[in-house]
Image (cartoon, grey):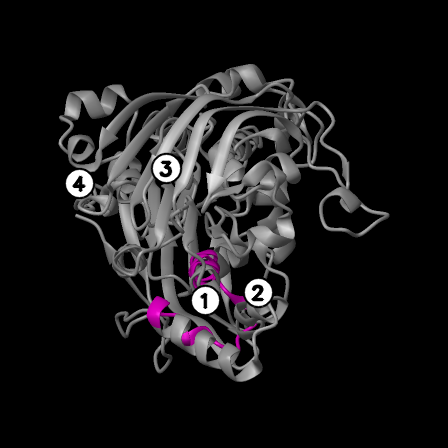
Amino acid sequence: MTETGRITLDGVSFSYRADRSVEANDVFGVAGTETTAPVEPKRGVSGITMNCAPGSLTVLCGPSGSGKSTVLRLINGLAPNFHPGDVSGTVLVSGADMPTTPLAEVGRLSATVFQNPRTQFFTSTVTTELAFTLENFGVAPPEIRERVATAADQCGTSGLLGQKLSTLSGGQLQRVACTCAVVSGVPVLLLDEATSNLSPQAIDELSDLLVELKAEGTTIITAEHRLHHLRDLADEVYYLRDGRIEHHFTGQEFFDLDEVTRRALGLRSLTRPTPPNPTADPHSPDTTEGLELRDIRFSYGKNPVLDIDRMVFPAGAITGLIGPNGVGKTTLARLICGLEKPARGGRITLAGKTLSARARAAAGYIVMQDTGRQLFADTVLDEVTLGTPGDHDAAELLAALGLADTASRHPLSLSGGQRQRLVIATALAQKKKVYIFDEPTSGVDLAHLEAIAAKLRELADAGAVVIVITHDAELISACCDRVIELTAPRGTVPTHGTHPNQSKENHP
């Protein structure tokens, strides 16, 4: 008798087809539309064999683009049913053959939390999104309300119920996506870089949730670069490279790896990183060469988000901007780059000159969390050169960020981590005075984190204002000169507990 929640992959190989377009009639039963996101042909995975027992937690790790997401797509049926390709071998989930299981039935077998949660939402509010799957399963309304409330309480998202998804931060959206997976009550949970936009406190909450789900018998597979929170949770760890399983460890074997081996494998820290005290700031906070914010107030409707009396980002330095999910870090970035306007009386100056929203947009460049919104060209190389002054070496930028072999590929065929690095390359080519990087190392392995840190240092050394919005303590350690913690405006109740003042600055 097949065990509910058991996952078996036996000699599985998969390669994407050259023509990504597929009639939606083949996927959703709706004629007349197409899906058109391209993938590179022949890329995929080869010879994947795994056996995940019910109630176990399995980790997939390895370099960006090594095939981790493809393995998850095979398990949840998106490959080959949504991402067309050629598959061989056996993929079983609770006894069901996934390549032949209709996607309409997959939702009863597993739930997936994607790296970019925006791609998996169908409604406009948190509450309706949590109810969406259960409504499609025909669950009675009273039971839906009870299960939504229970899951939200379990996942720490009760405070978000009723809010519009469009008003939430990337970290909050990630937590809502996790709640959607839990409310479905399925036996298998798949996580694809689920911690990529989460604060340290939210990561701890996710770890506690995984402990609960394991105890309840849920089978969990998580593809991750940030690994420290999985210590004492992982039963099996598979290390992938170039679409193949290169190493297989037990959880204890993996987290006992020495530092030399860890770095040789290109893995992020296996122990909880502690943000160090920032190194000496080469510029005084009173410098007139940098970016200064005064009397910045901003609200979404009646909800105050920012209340800043004064904040300085010196030129020639890398400033880390940290704080809980939903505290307003991305909103502040949008204000600095001219995508939003502060309330009357707010001033933003660069080198002592007050800048309008239009002038801020011309002077600054932002690398967003959702990098798919910033990809427009047909090839990776064209993306880097699009709208640039032309006095840069695009090939050198791609090589420095580990993308040299992707120059002729379509940007949307890249993995999440590769897309992140591509948008960073386009930012570096812009020759701006102010750069803001919003979670630039989500979905990024150790080698590429260090490469990104080196490029940010080059920008700062050239005299630019460099602001890094991040929850990534390893990135802060690698490159930040100073750190500003953004907290909730006085009198508001943030998503996580914060200091009553709007910001506090740490520097030697």
Between the residue at mark 2 and the residue at mark 3, the CA separation in whole angstroms equals 49 Å
Q: CA distance from mark 4 to mark 2?
A: 36 Å
- Amino acid type shown at disc 2: Thr
Query: Which residue was labeled with disc 4?
Result: 271
Q: Residue most toward the front?
A: 1
The amino acid type found where label 4 is placed reads: Thr
Q: Is residue 123 left or right of residue 298?
A: right
Image depth: mark 2 or mark 3 in front: 2
Q: Is residue 430 magenta?
A: no
Residue at the (50%, 65%) spot, across then down:
168
Q: Which span of residues is magenta-colored?
A: 154-179
Please state the horizontal and vertical placement of residue 426, each as a whole percent of the image: 57, 31
**Residue 393 in view:** no
Mark with earlier residue (4, 3)? 4
Q: Which residue is mark 2?
A: 133
In the picture of the structure, the residue carrying the numbered disc 1 is 183
